[in-house]
Image (cartoon, rainbow, N blue to C red):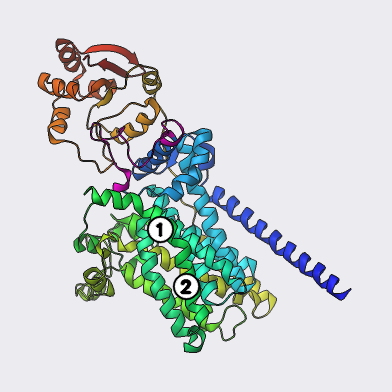
Amino acid sequence: MKRAQARMQLLRDSTQRVAWYWWAAAYFVILTVAMTWPLVLRMGNAIAGKHGDSLLFIWLIGWAQKSLFTLHQSPLFTSLINYPEGWRPATTEITPAMVLTGLPFSLLGGPVLGYNMSLLLSFASSGFIICWWVYRVTGRLVAGMIAGTIFAFSSYRVAHFMAGHLNLLGTQWLALYFMSMYEVLESSPKSRVWVFVGGVALGLVAWTSQYYLYMTLVLSVLFVLIHAFVRGARFVLQRAYACRLLGILAVSVPLLIVAEYPYLEAAQAGELPSRGIGEAIRNSAGLADYILPTTWNDIAGDWVIERFDRSLWVESSLYIGIGVFSMVLLALVAPDDRFGSKATRLHMFAMAVAALVLSLGPELRCFSGASPPHLPHALGWILDACEAAVPLPGSLLSRFLPFYTSVRVPARYGAYVILFLSVLAGIGTAFLLTSGPRVRRHLLVAILLAILAFDLEPWRVRFSSIEGREVDYWLATQPGGGAVIELPIDGQDTRLYAYYGLIHGKPIFGGQNIFPYQLDEEINAALGEIPDREALNLLRSVGAQYFIVDVGWYDEIHALDDLELAMTELAVRRVAVIDGYQVYVLEP
């Protein structure tokens, strides 16, 4: 009888815990919609921010859909870009985990919808996984929800969201991997399950970003070493300890092989770019980046822009925040082990410090950017102190660790800084919620939420439309597979040409500014000489068929009549005028 009652109580407790997880998931979904509002109203035809790297990832989702479901071929090579040579997407980040996340939605409503859904899901899942981790450590769901909010809507993630870096927003797998590593090293009752989850999560990190994979492997070594130090020899010198770590590696190996195959193939073809230490120095964080409020903050943003070089704002937006710092400090000074052992708190703090040091790159810098800040004369000593180039561990890693210079932007270690600090902030919040008289706790929590509202202020989302043109849909109905040339070659919206190519389905010359292509020099020169007769003959010989002319652009520079006359004299036939575009056909 007692056993049956115990089972029923255990079932009720389990159901309650699951219910709380659903509440947490709903919270992060609603918060994501609110913080990115009104993006949810324009999911299928607009993106947050300006046209830029986002167009690459939209194209990758659209190309995956087209190659897999229409052309029935591998998406690892395309002849639709950089015609006639073709293009290998693995010369840049192909982020298959994020592409596959958006693919089902792309099938329903197009690649722009798929891209936006993949972005929004990254916010909700990143927050939920950190919430889950903190909840497991502290047993306090509210503390977990605050920690997840700090991580999901950190300045790092918001900056890359506005820049359209879909690959770098896949931070949910970083959180899941290190959470699994923690559970495995701490000998969780379900360690075998966490071994499997950790291995899969590491594979998904590799499927998300090569930057994150390399950084995660470096930090994994530190994660184990620091854990061994804070836990002591007795805890780690066990056979099971090493076996669990090897288990994670064994599970991840097949996924890692699949993830790295496209890049190895591109390397064999000599198409991967090489990086030098100079590039790493330019793209390293400065200590001030973790202190300066974001440029989009209504209260302090303008002050920061006026006094500091924020030209690299996308990479240098690493503001931690007063609220996070306060909760981290509370977690470190808390005297008891109610919410995470002292070893756990030291482990998380040491990892945050290690990631911060690596984010500073090869040399210590106080400020990122090329220009010195505009500080009062009394603070000139700060600039003098910052002139000394103090070497950091990143310098040694660049010299002795294979491929470390491929980590072009050390500032992206900042993602890990905020990850570990978020866990610590959650632990500190748990102490705050349960310490002292109720009235004082409520007052302190209100103050904390007010500070976080400043730190995580909703940003003003500006949109850029991405829609197909009528001429693209018309061109899709035309026979023949000849290549398309968009005129002007160097127009303002050339980065959209690849997206338009997904609609009309015909190959285009070049990748139009967002793809690292290398077009044949002779063909590239011919594109710049249109409508020269010899240039047209060369382009005809390699399969050019259609010219799409932006009438408005040529009208603005008073060159449309000259272009039309030249095309007519060279017997290039105009076949359509559609919504501000002229279409010419280059006959065989």
Q: Nearer the viewer, residue 269 or 546?
A: 269
Q: Which residues are magenta?
A: 66-91
Q: Secondary structure at mark 2?
A: helix
Image quadrant in which the C terminus is located? top left
Outermost residue on the right side: it is 1
Q: Secondary structure at mark 1?
A: helix
Does the residue at mark 1 contact the one at mark 2 (Cβ under 8 Å)? no
Q: Amino acid at mark 1?
A: Leu
Q: Nearer the viewer, residue 65 or 532?
A: 65
How crowded pointer 2 is (Cα within 10 Å; few <14, some 14-19, many 20+) is rated as some
Residue under the image location 86 percent in, 75 percent down = 2
Q: Is residue 561 visible?
A: yes
Among numbered discs 1 and 2, the one appearing first in the sequence: 2
Horizontally, is 24 left or right of 107 in the view? right
Residue 306's mark?
none
Q: Position of residue 569 (x, y in %)?
A: 14, 10
Q: Quadrant of residue 360?
A: bottom left
Residue identifier under label 1: 256
Rendered position, 104 above or below 149: above
Q: CA distance from mark 1 to mark 2?
A: 16 Å
Q: Examine the structure image and report whether residue 68 is included in the region drawn in magenta.
A: yes
Residue under the image location 39 percent in, 53 percent down = 259
Q: Position of residue 117 (x, y in %)?
A: 51, 44
Q: Examine the structure image and report whether residue 588 is included in the region drawn in magenta.
A: no
Residue 245's mark?
2
Image quadrant in which the N terminus is located? bottom right
Rendered position, 459 above or below 377: above
Q: Nearer the viewer, residue 202 or 501?
A: 202
Q: Position of residue 455 (x, y in %)?
A: 47, 62
Q: Quadrant of residue 373?
A: bottom left
Q: Position of residue 69 (x, y in %)?
A: 46, 33
Q: Amino acid at mark 2?
A: Leu
